[in-house]
Structures are given as C-alpha cells and as structure tokens.
Image: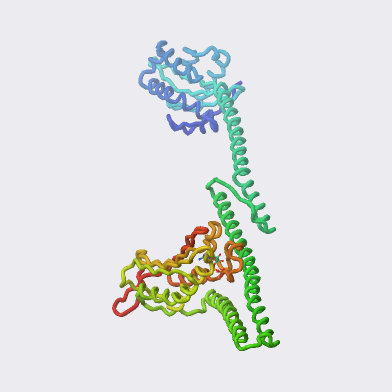
Amino acid sequence: MIKVELRRFNTVHGTEANVMTLVSEPVKMLDEMTEPTFRTLLSMAKDDPDGLMDSDLQYRINGGLCEQDSYFVLIKDDEVLFAGSSEFDEYSSDIVSAAESLKAEALEPEGKVIYSDKKSPLLLKVGNVSFTDGADGRFVLVTDTGILISKVRTALDAIIILAVLSIFITAFVIIAWLFTGVIRPIDSLRKAAKEIGSGNLNFKLEREEKDEIGELCSDFEEMRRHLKTQIDSKDRYELDVREMVSNVSHDLKTPLTAIKGYAEGLLDGVADNPEKRNKYLKTIVVKAIDMTTLVDELSYFSKLDTNKLPYKFELLNAKNFFEDCFEDYSIELEMKNFATEFASEISPDIMVLLDVEQIRRVMNNLIGNAVKYRDENKDGKITVRLTDAEDSVRISVADNGIGISRASLPHIFDRFYRADKSRTAGRAGTGIGLAIVRKIVEEHGGRVFARSELGIGTTISFTIKKGAKQNGNQNINS
Ligand code: ADP
C-alpha cells in the first residue's frame, strides 16, 4: 500500500525557481514545473468542469505534461476517465486511493501537493472537480520524480566532478604562481642577502615582473649597486690615500735630501767661498719653499674639505679681476719661456661675486698645472679666456702641454688622483690641486670642466655666477 504524505510547498513561481532549488529541493522544483498547468486545470474545474471530459483537451494537456515527465489523470466517482501514461496501470489503485484519501482530508477545490513516498516517488497534485451531473471527481497531475531526480543527480555528479577539477586546476595554478612568483624570487632574495652578508657584491638580482616582489627585488638590486659603489669608492679612496702618502713622502724626501746635502756641505766647509756658500743657502731656501708649498696645499685641502674656511664674497668686475690675476703671473711665465694670452669675450661691465683669495688659488692651481705639465718639446703657451655662459662667466685656462689621456680625464678632479703616472713622473704633485679647484668653484655655485688631447694640450674651465648690485645690496643672479 502506498504511503501518502500530505505536504504543502511554499511555491516559488516561474523564473524565481533556480538551479539551487533544483539541487536542494528537487520535489519542490517539480512542483513548480507543473504549477501553471495545475492552476489552469483548477480554474477549468471551477468554471467548466464538464469541459475536462473533452478528450482533445485531455490529450493536449497530457502532451504538455509529458515534456515535464508528468501525466494527466481524470477520475469521476471511482472511475478513471483518462490516464495519460501506461505507467498509470502499475500504480492506478495507489493513485486512485491516494486521491480518494485526500477527500477525507477535506480537500479544498484548490490544488494540493501530495508526495507519495515509494521507491520511485510520485508527486501527485490533486484538484477537486464537481461535475454538473452531481458526480464527484478529481484530476491528478502525476510526476515521476525518479526520472527527474536521477537527471538532477547526474547533473549534480557532473557539477561535483567539474568543481573538484576546477579546484585542482586552481590549486595547481596558485601553487605554480606561488612557486615562480613568490617562492623562487624570495629564494633569490635570501641567497642575495646571504651573498651580501658574506661581503660579495658582485652579482646581479634580476626580475622583470613589475609586481610587489619585482619591486622588492629591484629595490634590493638598487641597494646592492649603491653599496658596491660606496665600497668601491671607499677602496679607491684608501688606495688613493696610500698613493698620496707615498707621493708626499717622496716629494718631501727629495727637497729634504737636498737641504741635508747642502747643509752638510756648508758645515764640512765644502762651500769654501762666499759665492758657493750663497748658492748653497739659496738652494736650501728654494727647497724649503717647495716643501712649505706642499705642506700648505695639504693643510689647505684638509681645511677646505672639512668646511673650515670662511668665504668672503666681493662683487667685482669680471674682466678686470681675471686680467689682473693673470697679469700677476706674466713675469714668472715669461721667465719660464711661456707665451701668454688673455682674451675676454664678455661685456666689460659684467660683475661677478667671488672670494678673491679662493679664486686666486684656483687660478694659481690651473696656471701652475699648465706650467708643470708643459711639453718640453715645444714652446709653451697659456691662454686665459673669458666667455659668456648665460647667468655665469666661463673662465678657461688653456695650455699646449702634454695633455691628458681619455681614460684619465673623467678622474682628474677626484682627490689624490694623478693621471698617466709614467708621463707625470718627475713632476711633484699630490693629486689634490684640481680637487681644491672643484671644491672652491662648487662653493661659488659654479662648475668645472676639462677638455684635453694627448700631445695637443689641456683646457680647464670653470664658471662663476654673474652678480649685480641691487639697491646697494650684493646678490648672486640665479
Ligand atoms: P697634481 O698635484 O698631480 O698636479 P692635480 O689635482 O692638480 O694634482 O691634477 C691631477 C692630475 O691631472 C695631474 O696629476 C695630471 O696628471 C693631470 N693634469 C692636471 N692639469 C693638467 C694639465 N694642464 N696638463 C696635463 N695634465 C694635467
């Protein structure tokens, strides 16, 4: 005997029924499907009950229900007038008695949803019909839930398989991304940090991706390069200092040896006439002056480097100042057989703001170098030229000396740097003259440049900002 269970469904109409309903409550979904037909039949049962006996109508209704795995049954009294499926025969007595039992449940003329619990459960939707001849009847919409539920299960299985597959694929993609995008770069970062920790900076950390880790890698690489540059320059500085100490001690030793020799000569009476004695004494004085100049340059640089020298700026006529400055060397240069030229290409009233003592030292160093690095095979010539450079005046000291090699040129303003050792050998120097020049010029807000060709000559230029007198105040034009 079929077990009849009366259930009321909270019917969700039309399109609101969704896949979730199909999966979570398949019976409710089936109820939804046949609901429009059920409603039509209910209103027909009310308005034209006898019309339900029209067999054309019955087949039409049944045809529509077949597409929803359902069929139509019409019962008048206890007689089955229409049954839309051959399967009905198997359950006819159950269906009829189930429909009948609903009568006892005081079935309203509206539709009720009944769920028949059996192996392949049937969903029965029963409606009351009161025929015009006074006979009692019922129409039943029978839905075989088994067919649809198994379809749903198959779909559900497919969905589960798809879901599991997509979880696996997603997991694989995430793991692959984690490995190539996170773990591997972090591993290279870790290795790089270890290398830096052990003092090795000669590697390159490369990552082209522009994500956060890519940025971290490029910041790390930037830090490595920065550290390397600093360490390299510190190493070079230490090397330069060592070389400078050896140069200075050599440069001090040479005049000291001479002074010692000449002094001993005087003591031993080797200089036996006043003329000789005078010559010995003069040589001692010259050598002592050389030493003083060297020591003075070193101490000046150390003061300049630690910013201990105060600047006293004055507003001066550019042409007059530099012409006078160069003039001071003319006799000395003439004595050393140098031809000199002063060329001013600037307006004669241009003013510059400068510290006279410091700029004189700049000129002294540049002219001194032009003399020191002269080419002994030709007549020396030194030209000082003033040119206009927008808001500055450019001062160039050009010579026709030995020149500087292309490789050395970028370093000549570095402290303690002495270019082309083989050719500068025998010419005293510390390698700080041009470093002093650069420092002073930069303190004036200017820049230094060098142009040189081996065997042709060198031109060292620097700029000094033009100044103007305004309302009695001195300003630097910017
Ligand atoms: P130094 O005491 O050696 O002269 P500087 O700083 O004045 O030191 O110059 C640095 C180097 O630049 C010199 O050792 C020299 O090789 C090169 N140099 C500078 N000026 C000249 C120049 N006018 N002609 C050729 N070489 C020059």
- In the image: residue 3, left or right of residue 55: right
Q: Position of residue 229 (x, y in %)?
A: 59, 60
Residue 447 shows up from this direction: no
Q: Quadrant of residue 295?
A: bottom right
- Decide which of 160, 285 is in the foreground and name it: 285
**Ligand 1 - quadrant of the structure image:** bottom right
**Residue 281 occupies quadrant:** bottom right
Q: Is residue 200 left or right of residue 114?
A: right
Looking at the image, the residue that sits furthest to the left is: 471
User: How many numbered tags mark residues here?
Assistant: 0
The quarter of the rendered structure image containing the C terminus is bottom left
Q: Where residue 164 appears, x then y in whole percent?
A: 61, 33
Residue 40: x %, y % from top left: 39, 22
Q: Which percent across, then down, holds residue 100? A: 51, 21
Q: Left or right of 233: which side holds 264?
A: right
Residue appearing at x 58%, y 56% in the figure: 225
Q: Is residue 421 visible?
A: yes
Q: Is residue 216 above or below residue 122?
A: below
Q: Which quadrant holds the N terminus?
A: top right
The front one of 284 and 346 is 284
Q: 36 or 287: which is nearer to us?
A: 287
Q: Quadrant of residue 384?
A: bottom left
